């Protein structure tokens, strides 16, 4: 009988524990399990959101790099164009200086030729005056003309003979 009483006591204890402790513990375990599952789902959602943000950030970074490279390329192109324009302007100025120098040289040469002609006329007049005033023989006249020609050779201007 004690055995039956002990079994009966055990069964009553199990029934009371089941009603009082087991169901609340199971509820608490189930609530904790749901809380953990929700936390895992939230973490997965946050991870997915973080991946999307990272992808968006990487895309913006790539776009920014492309734009920066475009700006650098435009700046390099503009600098090259300005350099080329500067070189062209310098060449044009040099060509104008050459042209002006050639014109100056031509004017100076013309002026030198005019001066040379003037001097030749003056020397010719002097020589003619000496020949006429000396009224010498042919030998003396030839010597005077020869001296005059030698003097003209000494007075050459540049490459132009007098």
Image (cartoon, rainbow, N blue to C red):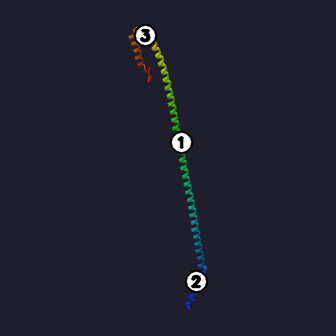
Question: Disc 3 and disc 2: Cα gap in Å?
Answer: 168 Å
In the rendered image, residue 42, in percent from the top left (x then y), is placed at: 58, 66
Q: State the mark number for residue 66.
A: none
Crowd tier of the residue under label 2, counting other residues whose Cα lies within 10 Å: few below 14, some 14–19, many 20 or above: some
In the rendered image, residue 16, in percent from the top left (x then y), is placed at: 60, 82
Task: Tell me: 23 left or right of 120.
Answer: right
- 114 versus 60 height, above or below: above
- 90 versus 70 height, above or below: above
Which structural element holds mark 2?
A: helix
Q: Which residue is mark 3?
A: 131
Which structural element holds mark 3?
A: helix
Question: Disc 3 and disc 1: Cα gap in Å?
Answer: 73 Å
Crowd tier of the residue under label 3, counting other residues whose Cα lies within 10 Å: few below 14, some 14–19, many 20 or above: some
- 48 versus 17 height, above or below: above
Instruction: Work out whether residue 68 or residue 8 is closer to the camera in this orientation and state it.
Output: 68
In the rendered image, residue 158, in percent from the top left (x then y), is placed at: 44, 23
Q: Which residue is mark 1?
A: 81
Q: Residue at x 43, y 10 (%)?
A: 131
Q: In terms of sequence position, does the residue under pointer 3 or pointer 2 come before the other?
A: 2
Which structural element holds mark 1?
A: helix
Report the quarter where the C terminus lies.
top left
């Amino acid at each position: 009988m004690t055995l039956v009483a002990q079994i009966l006591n055990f069964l009553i204890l199990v029934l009371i524990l089941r009603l009082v402790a087991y169901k609340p513990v199971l509820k608490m375990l189930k609530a904790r399990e749901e809380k953990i599952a929700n936390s895992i789902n939230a973490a997965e959602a946050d991870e997915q959101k973080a991946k999307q943000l990272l992808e968006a950030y990487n895309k913006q970074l790539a776009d920014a790099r492309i734009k920066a490279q475009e700006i650098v390329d435009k700046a390099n192109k503009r600098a090259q164009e300005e350099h080329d324009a500067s070189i062209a302007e310098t060449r044009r100025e040099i060509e104008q200086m050459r042209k002006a120098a050639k014109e100056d040289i031509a004017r100076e040469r013309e002026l030198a030729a005019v001066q040379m002609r003037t001097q030749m006329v003056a020397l010719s007049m002097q020589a003619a005056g000496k020949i006429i005033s000396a009224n010498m023989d042919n030998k003396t006249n030839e010597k005077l003309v020869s001296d005059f020609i030698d003097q003209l050779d000494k007075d050459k201007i540049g490459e132009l003979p007098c």
